[in-house]
Image (cartoon, helix red, strand yellow):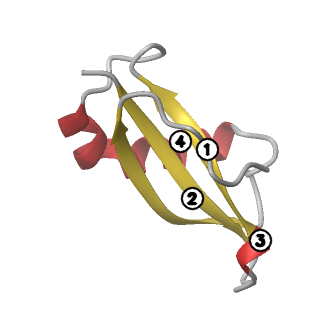
Amino acid sequence: MFVTLIAVLCHGLSGTPGACVEEIVTDSSKSDITLQSCMIQGQIGIAKWMSEHPIYHADWTLQRYKCAPGHYELHVKA
């Protein structure tokens, strides 16, 4: 099954809805992620991705993450 790992990130401490974005962290075409490994280890993968990503390196926090079966279309993009 194809799986997509999505992070919902918010800038600073702002509660403003426009200050949050969705980002696709990885999917089955880029890694050997399964739905089970996504649900168990997804937060660890996102933390590593955030530390290496130039935009989300500072002042962004992980609001939540989700593991979506199939190809995922972003709702809010940075």
**Can you identify the residue that label 4 sits on?**
48
Quarter that holds the N terminus: top left
- The label nearer to you, 3 versus 1, is 1
Q: Return the residue nearer the eye: 72 or 28.
A: 72
First-in-chain label (1 vs 2): 2
Q: Return the residue nearer the eye: 75 or 4.
A: 75
The location of residue 9, given as percent across then percent down, is: 63, 61
**Can you identify the residue that label 2 sits on?**
8
First-in-chain label (3 vs 1): 3
Q: Which mark is residue 74?
A: 1
Residue at image position (39%, 19%) is: 28
**Can you identify the residue that label 3 sits on?**
19
Q: CA distance from mark 3 to mark 4?
A: 22 Å
Crowd class of label 1 (few under 14; some 14 to 19; many from 20; radius 10 Å): few
The location of residue 57, given as percent across then percent down, is: 74, 51
First-in-chain label (1 vs 4): 4
Crowd class of label 4 (few under 14; some 14 to 19; many from 20; radius 10 Å): few
Q: CA distance from mark 3 to mark 1?
A: 15 Å
